[in-house]
Image (cartoon, grey):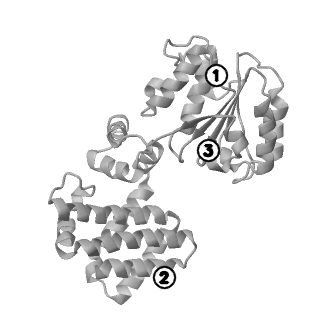
Amino acid sequence: MSGFKDVVGHKNIIQYIGNAVNSGMVSHAYILNGEKGSGKKLLANLFAMSLQCENREPDGDACGKCRSCRQALSGNHPDIIRIHHEKPSTITVDEIREQVNNDIVIKPYSSKYKIYIIADGDMMNVQAQNALLKTIEEPPEYAVIMILTENADTLLPTIRSRCVMLKLRNIKDQLVKKYLMEHMEIPDYKADICVAFAQGNMGKAISLATSEHFNEIKEEAVKLLRNIDGMQADELAEAVKKCSEFKMDITDYLDIIAVWYRDVLIYKATKSVDRVVFSDQMRPIRERASKSSYEGLELILEAIEKAKARLKSNVNFELTMELLLLTIKEN
C-alpha cells in the first residue's frame, strides 16, 4: 500500500489529513480512535509518511517513491518512532519517559517533523499518561504525537482536550465486500458471511476471510443448528462439550448462531432470500422458519445475548451453553 488513495473508507479523515498537510496546519497531538482492525495503524503510518514525504502529491498524499517514503514503507524512518511496550496490557511511565520524553528534545534527523506513534494508547497507566501530558503541553515545534486507542475515554480528560480526535467509523458493507472479492478473490457467498460478522471493520473482515479456524467454527455451529431439533439429553450434553472446543472463540461461535437465527427471522417475515447470509443453507432455514414462532425466534436471539453477557462475567461455561442450547431446542 503506497498511499491514502488505496484506503477503503475513512474518506472524511483522509480529507482532513490532506488539508492539514497541505496547509501546514498540523497539530502537535492526535488521537486515532477505533475498534481493533478498524485501520488506526494504517492511517497513522500513512499520515506520518505524508508529513515526511519529499515530493508530496497535490492532494496531500505521499508520493511513495522518495527516499523518505521508502524509509517509511520499510519501517526504518529515523524520524518516525513507534513506541513499544514489554508488558502485554500496560505501557509504563518509564517507557513513555525513555521513548518519548527523553527523545523528543533531540531535533529531527532528516525531516521537518519528528513523529511518535503510540499504538495501544489506552494501555498507558495514569503515571505514563501524566508523563506524556507534560510533553503534549509544551512540545517542540517539530513534534507530532499520534495516540492510537480502542477506547479514548480511558485517557485523561487533560490529554483528550489537548489532542485532535479522529474517530474511525464503520466502513459500508458493500465496500468491504467489494474489497474482499476484487483484491482477495473471496467468492461471493464467503464474502457475504465475512461482511456480516465484520460489521464494517475491514481488518476483521480480512482476518475472517483468511482464517481456516473461523471456517471450522462456522461449520460446527451450522451442523449443530441443523441437528438440534432431534437431539436427546445425552446428545445435548455432548454438544455442550463440543462447544467447549471453541471456548477461546466463543464470541464468533455465538455470533454465527445469532446470524443464522436472524436469517430465519428475515426469511419468515419476507419469504425472500435476498438478505439471507447463509444462502447455502436455505432448506434448514426454511424448515426452522416454518416451525418457530416470531416470539420463539426473539427468545433465542435474546438468549444468545444473555449467554455472551454471562460468559463475559465468567459464569460457568458449560451451564451457560446448556441453558442456551435448551432455549434453542425448545423454541
Image quarter where the C terminus lies is bottom left
Q: Is residue 63 left or right of residue 221?
A: right
Instruction: Rate crowding at label 2 as few (under 14), some (14 to 19) or many (20 or more) other CA atoms within 10 Å.
Output: few
Amino acid type, mark 3: Thr
Please give the name of the residue rendered at 77% of the width and 50% of the height, measured from the top-left corner.
Answer: 126
Which is closer to the viewer, label 1 or label 3?
A: 1
Q: Can residue 283 be seen in this view?
A: yes
Q: Mark 1 falls on what kind of element?
A: loop
Q: Is residue 54 left or right of residue 254?
A: right
Report the disc number at residue 319: 2
Q: Mark 2 falls on what kind of element?
A: helix
Please give the name of the residue rendered at 30% of the width and 78% of the height, measured from the top-left corner.
Answer: 228
Pinpoint residue 160: horizontal percent, then vertical percent: 67, 40
Report the disc number at residue 26: 1
Pinpoint residue 152: horizontal percent, then vertical percent: 62, 46
Q: Name the residue under label 3.
A: 149
Please give the name of the residue rendered at 77% of the width and 38% of the height, measured from the top-left corner.
Answer: 133
Quadrant in the rendering for residue 84: top right
Sequence-wise first label, 1 or 2: 1
Amino acid type, mark 2: Leu
